[in-house]
């Protein structure tokens, strides 16, 4: 990559700096063929140096500079949805995200409003049920993104945090995997110490990754909660491609628990394949014996039609997910399994968890209020993975 002769320098009110000493390492399960440098990527020398160092990890990748193009306007040259999707998984985009900190505003389901932020965009993994693939921004430009203005993002979080009067979560994992690209960026080594110094701001990070080596020696001061998205091995084999196995993820959870982090698990999406009762009960028994959790959240398919169409392109129209979905959208615009089936699955798994660990808090993700009512767990509404 040709270095910029005259990088644009700015005087941003930065609370953190991109680490000049961190040496990028290859991110497992990600091997980009194209790297695109977009608008704002070279605002500072540190941004340029990090981008160049990451490019050096992938010497065979074709590097394209598009410094007049926003990160969300990258066109990949394909109009066919599945081809576009997989081309995006092999494309790394550098850019800046000017609205990376947001407050969720889900309506007509139980999801509480919470702060979330995005130092990354999308994900290199290939879960066949991925709901992110159907969101408008990803559908148009489904590239894997690293945003180089992390100091500016943390500065914005710090501004919000300074006005808080009680512990409040800031969630990393809503629109990306929180650790999949961490070997490349080392961002965890900046983000976690940043939250360790906050009075009320707390980090909740969701991942399917096992890239935890950067985390283990950090003084996190119990201000970071790490959460893993998991499914049984049988579900993993059928629906999760190009990512670590459940056993590997549980091993990573144990390492982080030993380093003093609070650990959570999200079992989602629960897919009621044939024999699901035995499959999930065995898995939950193994999980709860292996790792001390401070919360477990259960969730089922709650996706948009665009993402489900992509799932059918991958698995065929008569797949175990599509075969069981309701034909109409719920009030929040998402498609789910029928309420009767959802309640049956939740009731069974809640009973299993309570028998194994009676005191473990249980939440439901993205569910409708009527589901909580049917299960007689109204007090659990809003007490799920993304909040304290």
Image: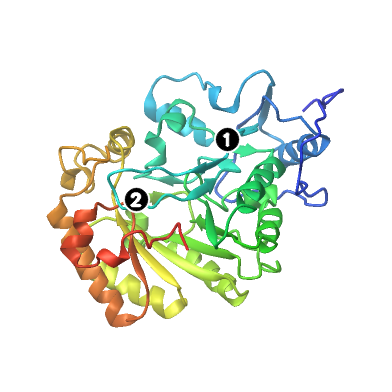
Q: How many marks?
A: 2
- Pick the front one: 325 or 169: 169
Circle 2 packing at 10 Å, graded few (<14), some (14-19), many (20+), is: many
Is mark 2 in CB contact (under 8 Å) with mark 1?
no
- Pick the front one: 199 or 33: 199
Return the residue at label 1.
99
- Pick the front one: 244 or 71: 71
384 relative to 193 in the view: left or right? left
- Locate the N terminus and report the quarter of the image it occupies: top right
- Residue 291: horizontal and vertical position, in percent? 47, 76
Residue at image point 17% right, 47% down: 324
Q: Mark 2 falls on what kind of element?
A: helix
N-term mark: 2 or 1: 1
Height in image: 45 above or below 211?
Answer: above
Return the residue at label 2.
239
206 relative to 14 in the view: left or right? left
Q: Tell me the number on the disc at residue 82.
A: none
CA distance for labels 2 and 1: 32 Å
Q: Nearer the viewer, mark 2 or mark 1?
A: 1
- Residue 105: horizontal and vertical position, in percent? 40, 42
3 relative to 198 in the view: left or right? right
Circle 1 packing at 10 Å, graded few (<14), some (14-19), many (20+), is: few
Quarter of the figure with residue 58: top right
Residue at image point 69% right, 40% down: 152
- Residue 86: horizontal and vertical position, in percent? 46, 33
Kindly tell me whether residue 123 is visible in this rendering: no
- Pick the front one: 36 or 388: 388
- Residue 193: horizontal and vertical position, in percent? 70, 60
């Amino acid at each position: 990559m040709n270095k910029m002769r005259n990088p644009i320098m700015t005087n941003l009110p930065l609370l953190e700096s991109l680490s000049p000493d961190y040496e990028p390492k290859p991110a497992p399960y990600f091997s980009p063929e194209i790297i695109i440098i977009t608008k704002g990527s070279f605002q500072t020398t540190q941004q340029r140096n990090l981008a160049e160092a990451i490019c050096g990890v992938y010497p065979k990748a074709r590097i394209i500079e598009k410094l007049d193009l926003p990160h969300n306007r990258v066109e990949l040259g394909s109009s066919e949805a599945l081809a576009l999707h997989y081309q995006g998984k092999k494309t790394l985009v550098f850019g800046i995200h000017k609205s990376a900190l947001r407050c969720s505003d889900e309506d007509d389901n139980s999801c509480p409003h919470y702060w979330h932020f995005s130092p990354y965009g999308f994900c290199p993994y290939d879960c066949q049920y991925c709901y992110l693939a159907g969101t408008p921004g990803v559908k148009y430009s489904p590239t894997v993104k690293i945003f180089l203005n992390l100091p500016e993002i943390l500065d914005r979080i710090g501004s919000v945090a300074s006005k808080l009067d009680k512990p409040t979560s800031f969630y990393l994992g809503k629109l990306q995997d929180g650790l999949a690209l961490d070997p490349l960026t080392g961002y965890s080594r900046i983000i976690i110490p940043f939250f360790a110094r906050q009075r009320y701001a707390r980090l909740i990070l969701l991942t399917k990754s096992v890239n935890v080596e950067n985390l283990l020696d950090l003084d996190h001061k119990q201000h970071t909660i790490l959460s893993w998205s998991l499914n049984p091995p049988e579900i993993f084999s059928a629906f999760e491609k190009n990512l670590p196995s459940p056993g590997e993820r549980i091993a990573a959870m144990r390492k982080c628990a030993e380093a003093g982090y609070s650990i959570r698990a999200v079992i989602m999406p629960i897919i009621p394949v044939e024999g699901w009762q035995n499959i999930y009960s065995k898995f939950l028994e193994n999980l709860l014996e292996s790792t001390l959790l401070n919360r477990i959240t259960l969730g089922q398919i709650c996706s948009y039609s665009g993402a489900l169409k992509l799932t059918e392109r991958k698995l065929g129209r008569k797949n175990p997910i599509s075969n069981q979905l309701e034909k109409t959208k719920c009030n929040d615009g998402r498609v789910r399994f029928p309420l009767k089936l959802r309640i049956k699955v939740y009731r069974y798994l809640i009973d299993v968890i309570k028998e194994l660990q009676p005191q473990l808090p249980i939440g439901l993700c993205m569910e409708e209020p009527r589901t909580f009512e049917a299960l007689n767990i109204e007090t659990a509404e809003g007490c799920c993975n993304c909040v304290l």
